[in-house]
Image (cartoon, helix red, strand yellow):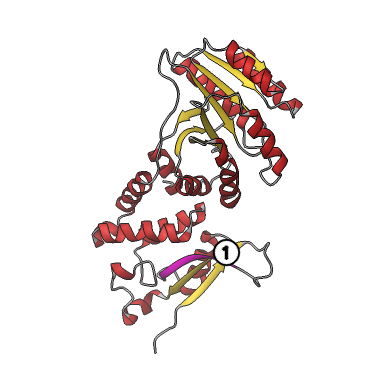
Amino acid sequence: MTTQAKTFRAPTMPEALAKVQIELGPEAVVLGVRKVLDGPAWQVWRDPEFEVMALPGDESASTGAMVWEPSTATSGSVMPEPVTHFSARLIEQGLDESFVNKIIASAVDGMSLRGLSERRMVRDFLSRALASRLTVGEFLPRKGEQRVVALVGISGVGKTSAAAKLAAYARYNLGRSVALISVDTFRVGALTQIQTFAEILDVPLSVCYTPGELSAALAAHADKDLIVVDTPGRNTRRALEMVEITTLFTPLPQSRRTYFVASATSKTADLAEATTAFKGLGLNGLIFTKLDETGGVGSLYMLAQGVGLAVSYFCSGPRVPEDIEPASAERMAELLLGW
């Protein structure tokens, strides 16, 4: 008599796999993994769980489960351990399940059965696949060229420190002349913070309360290669706040570059909603912050996929100017896949 496949659920993938091993033994064969919502549909606050479908190892041969069929690999057939491992890893990172299935399917279609059994080879293939889907690029000025860069985003994502790090990177790594402008006058802490940064970097700082003052500050720093404008964090669900920042942007030149600053600790849905709200300001690129504060960066990767903007810089710590680096698609793939 053939044993029926069993499903196991837990808050994390390691816990779900542990349940499989306890009940079915260490030779159990994983048939599939997915993320599901537990509880009745009306409980909108419920957290997702990981579901693993598996068979006892001694049943896999009699059921034919070990026959590898690439065309159905992501919808029920047994996957080699490396494929299962990285599929679970990417879902746990926060990547959309359908996106993960596509990436896994590309590995199944593009690799040999022997390669799919080698974790290093599967990781290398998935790393290239993930990196190839991420656009990166800097927008800082060449020597002798002036550029105005504005940073926008929701509250608490680290815009002010990102502005200081960007200014420091341009000055110390690229040898550009730099000025800072702050229009984030709503928080006393933000002004104190950027004043401290300006003193440390020894760059001029202008604090502007009105569009007129911003226009005058831009003219005063016209001799600088780079002008970095730090803006107040906005609640995108409050229409008045979005109107205020749109008004503040009026004096900025059309040639400006506007970065949306996204924190790795933010939810994918919140980031998508925020970028939609800020689109009217003419977004040109992304800066990812707080990469050191979470083990999951899937929300940032999915954001880049959804908005189609280039990722320009990674910020991963409190130090200025050390904790900023040009974005790398390969580096993002490493963070997603682990070692």
The reply to whether the magenta stretch includes residue 191 is no
In the image, 84 versus 106, the foreground residue is 106
Per the image, the residue denoted by label 1 is: 49
Residue 149 visible here: yes
Residue 151 as seen in the image, left or right of residue 82: right
Q: Quadrant of residue 252?
A: top right
Q: Is residue 219 above or below residue 230?
A: above
Q: Position of residue 119 (x, y in %)?
A: 34, 54
Residue 263 visible here: no
| Magenta region, residue range | 30-37
Q: Position of residue 154 (x, y in %)?
A: 64, 39
> Could you tell me which secondary element the residue under label 1 belongs to?
strand
Q: Is residue 86 above or below residue 178?
A: below
**The N terminus sits in image quarter:** bottom left
Q: Residue at x 41, y 69 (%)?
A: 30
Residue 79 as seen in the image, left or right of residue 206: left
What is the crowding at mark 1: few (fewer than 14 residues within 10 Å), some, or many (at least 20)? some
Q: Residue at x 61, y 37 (%)?
A: 153
In the image, 267 versus 318, the foreground residue is 267
Q: Is residue 8 above or below residue 138?
A: below
Q: Is residue 274 above or below residue 80?
A: above
In the image, 48 versus 282, the foreground residue is 282
In the image, 295 versus 298, the foreground residue is 298
Q: How many marks?
A: 1
Q: Residue at x 29, y 59 (%)?
A: 116
Q: Quadrant of residue 111?
A: bottom left
Q: Most prominent secondary structure in the magenta stretch?
A: strand
Q: Position of residue 106 (x, y in %)?
A: 32, 57
Q: Residue at x 63, y 61 (%)?
A: 47
